[in-house]
Image: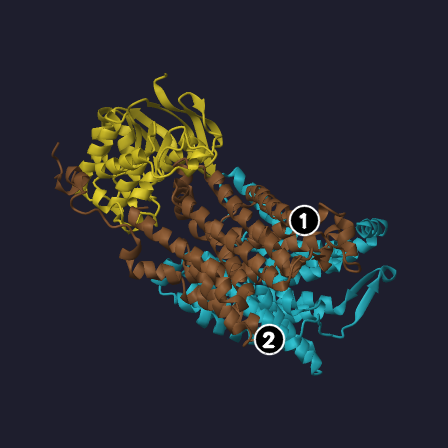
Amino acid sequence: MSEAVIELKGVCKSFGGVTANNDVSLIVPRGSITGLIGPNGSGKSTLFSSIVGYHPIDKGSILFNGREISRLSVPEIARLGLLRTFQTTRIYGKMNGLENMLISETQRQVGVFNMFAHGRKEAIDRAERLISFVGLYPKRFLPAGSLSFGQQKLLEFAMAMMNEPEVLLLDEPTAGINPTLINGLIDRLRSANIDFGITLFIIEHNMRVIMSMASKIYCLAHGELLATGDAESIQRDQRVIDAYLGAH
Amino acid sequence: MQHIIANISVLLAAPILNVGLLLDGLMIGAIFALAAYGLALVWGVMNVKNLAQGDFIMIGGYLAWCLDQRGLHPMWAVPLAFLLLWVIGWCLYKSVIRNVISRDLFTSLLATFGIAIVIQQGLNLAFGPNTQSAQADLPTWSFAGGLITVTGTRLFGLALALVLSAVVIVFMKSTRMGQAIRATAQDARAARVLGINTERVYAFTFCLNAAICGAVGALVAMVWNIQPFMGTTYSIRLFVIVTAAGFGNLPGVIAAGFGMGVFEQFGGFILGAQFQQALVVLLLLIVLAVRQIQQLSLRQALQ
Amino acid sequence: MKRIERGRQSIALLALFAAGLAAPLLLSDYTNELALLWLMILFAVTWDILGGQMGYNSLGNIFFFGAGMYISAIVQIGLFYDVGMYTSGARTTHISFSDLQYFSGLALGMLAAGIGSAILAAAAGWALFGLRGPYFAIGTLGLAIAAAELVASWEWVGAASGISMPVFPGNPELQKLFFYMLFFALGFALLLFLNWLYSTRFRLALNAVRDDEEKAEAMGLHTRRIKRTALIVAAFFLGIAGAIFGNMTGFIEPRDIAFPTTTFNIYMVLMVLLGGKGTFWGPVVGATVFHIIKEATWTYFLGWQYVTLGLLIVIIVVYFQQGIVGWMIESYPHWFAPKPASEESDAYAKASIDLAARPEGSP
């Protein structure tokens, strides 16, 4: 298998007259934690949305494990093992935490007949293990909508893990989380990567977080790829510094 | 089936007839466009899809008919219906609409549908199920040897619709309330923060829409006809117009209104009057299908 | 569902079955109304599959009811006579069916109605499920009205004059009991079926579509398949109900009997809202309360029935948002909701990583 699990070639996307992404090409190495940074409005979330098929792209190609996915629908791409979490944490509000987990099982083998499966012990066990992995076990019977913002973010993360993805796109996973709890989240993300083998592609504004986690970082500005490198070189890259400072 | 083909061949044989239908369609379309604007207004500002729109129109129509029955010229019904429906709109807003604005969309749809049923049945009990119209007794002009008739009534309807539209548009652009309405439509919370009394804006918008429907109804009674259960057909008709145009798009709504009028004139001629409701519903399904396909290319759904 | 809840559910279903069997014997004067009660339950429960569990509020479910009605009529008549001739001739001449013809026709008709409606649902789903929210509601309403208009101009099935159905061979008392039993059997079968269906992961899938369809798609759920299946299930039962109703009434017609968009079609929604959207017993409770109130008061409001109906709609929609069962679940949660884990079974809780205890900066 090739080294790149996701490969973008010349991706362009505009909305009306506004160009969100212009000729973006990048590679997410298999098994890595890769970062995507850039000032507000640089097109990071749009890029993620394009990758998971939320909208069609104007030009370019998106490859997942060498396969062109830019024409596939969101559920199809998700079933291939490419998931994302939303910037505005989305969970199933009226169902309880455990139900949220159970319905997040991977859908790859769900066919016309076994979509009526019934209380399977392995699924429930796995759901309970993952929900306690994020520390929400005592709250698993509460309606998900009644959990706090931080708890919902953790639930969303656990649901993503339940889906057994190959790659997880995380859109600002630490946004809105109490600084003292961020370490716990970083630990879990690292564990997802190392113990569960999930490739992570993360949009982050918190420099401490992303610099400590990512082995490779891309910086976007004004919809274009500005710089790329490991944590050290990106931090010292003058163009990156200018992009962030210039944005003020 | 044969009469459909016969009618189409008549149209092809005498092109001048098409002009007549076109003119009629545009004149009626102007009235549709005005009522559709009201629907789009309430939709955009309060996110309420008013399924009783057509029934408000019928109330206005019956007022005109009543005046006509008593010997008064139905033209007076236009301003009177405007006022009457304003009051009715205010009562409905305070009792029902206010409670459903903040709920989910289906609730408001269902609530207005309930209002529609009450109005329809009420009108039926009061006036009976027959089709009525109000006589305006305006002159009729004939062209092209009698093949095209332009009734004064329809011309009057067009003129009044244009005047009313102009008044509403100027109002929205230059008065404070008009600006407040547009601000609330864009972002209700921001409007509130800036000191706009959104409650009053909502009430005003709903009343304005009802009043517009009343005036339109009076015109409809003169230009066409009314019947207690026709309201649903109108509601669907207007919904089709707003859906086809997209509710933020005022010029689109006007154009679609005209298009609707023309389409119905031709459809009515070719298929026959009894297919009126079927035609409108068919158009609804077509418009929904087309919009869905448009959205599909963007990988979205129509919501 | 935990074992206690399963037990309670089974008892409730058993009680309902016993009541259903006993009712026509104890209340023999009201057999027709009881049959209609089961029809109302069918309407409410099928609507809730789409509206309550899946979040797709339909204003056109009556389409499948009427379709089933006409499909059954065509089969029942068509097996033995030419349909076109029958529909134009039955007004002037009495066309009779032997007992065997009647019952075999009815059985096959009901089956065809269910399957036919299910097939229509599969097709309609393809056209309808790109619509959400109010567009879906109005689109389905449009479908129902379109069907009424289409059938009303279709000579082969009697157009607006309708079709006289084959006459039941038996005395009126037997006829009432027979149709009651049919509705009871269908209604109870639906409840048993849903009792099973809602215990599978399909129920979670329905609820996921309701709570956040985009999220469901993003998690790889086969949302189109889920929606289509829900519609097919509802349509199947509605189709058979239509077939039974058409025979019970003895005469079918497009606008007021097969596709009554402002009566049965709206009652479905009201009954579910009244009883509690998205709950198992809510639609049943709502249908029962609604039907009893309506039957009791209709005669008093003669002439003003529909006005009161409209008012009822407004009142229910505005003031009864959760419905009876919904309100009960909120006020007495321990009767319904699963209990949070007790201390002894909380092995995982002790082992789970405690987020709050990790200070910033430590490894």
Residue occupying the far top of the picture: A1
- Camera-near label (2 vs 1) is 1
Residue B253 vertical placement versus C214 (above, below): below
SS at badge 2: loop
Left or right: where B216 falls relative to A75: right
Residue B63 in the image: x percent, y percent? 63, 76
Point out the tag, 2 or 1, that comes first from the N-terminus: 1
SS at badge 1: helix
Q: Which image quadrant is residue C298 in?
A: bottom right
Toward the viewer: C348 or A86? Answer: C348
Mark 2 belongs to chain: C
Type of amino acid under label 1: Leu
- Mark number, residue C303: 2
Shown in yellow, the chain is A
Task: Tell me which residue sits at (58%, 50%) in the image.
Answer: C239
Residue B20 in the image: x percent, y percent? 78, 58
- The residue that label 1 is drawn on is C100
Residue B298 vertical placement versus C255 (above, below): above
Could you tell me if residue A227 is visible in this image? yes
In the picture, which quadrant includes the N terminus of chain A?
A: top left
